[in-house]
Amino acid sequence: MLLQKNHIQNDIPLRIQRLLRKYDGLTISDVARKLDIHYTTASKYLAVLEAEKKIVRRDVGMAKLFRVVATGYDKRS
């Protein structure tokens, strides 16, 4: 069970990045709700991804909107 839990936790950053590719500009609450994870967990992983420069944050009033960093190459094309 512990191994499965660690695997799920290690998968969260990837799940967040996939989600942010789908929706441009999500709040911490949006991410937590859509991935069914706790707000604090979402906040922690968003901060890590931002520090790794994999996502960017834009402050809009009190809200923090996150999105994937634009690469100039869009796989959807």
Image (cartoon, helix red, strand yellow):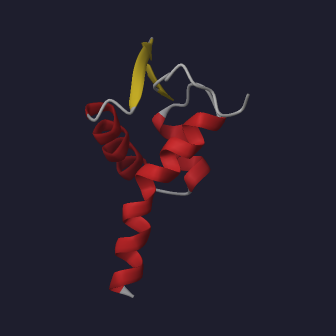
The image quarter in which residue 36 lies: bottom right
Q: Which of the image's four quarters has the N terminus?
A: bottom left
In the image, residue 29 lies at what x, y percent?
A: 51, 39
Q: Residue at x 43, y 16 (%)?
A: 58
Would residue 73 appear left or right of 6 to someone viewing this image? right
**Rendered view: 27 above or below 62:** below
**Rendered view: 16 above or below 62:** below
Whether residue 62 appears in this view of the structure is no
Give the residue furthest to the bottom: 1
Q: How many marks?
A: 0
Give the residue furthest to the right: 77
Residue in the foreground of this view, choosing between 17 and 37: 17
Q: Residue at x 37, y 52 (%)?
A: 41
The image quarter in which residue 47 lies: top left
Whether residue 64 appears in this view of the structure is yes
Would residue 10 appear left or right of 20 to someone viewing this image? left
In the image, residue 11 lies at what x, y percent?
A: 44, 61
Give the residue furthest to the left: 51
Would residue 44 appear left or right of 63 to someone viewing this image? left
Residue in the foreground of this view, choosing between 49 and 34: 49
In the image, residue 77 lies at what x, y percent?
A: 73, 28
Give the residue furthest to the top: 61
**Rendered view: 31 above or below 55:** below
Residue in the foreground of this view, choosing between 74 and 41: 74
In the image, residue 61 lies at what x, y percent?
A: 45, 11
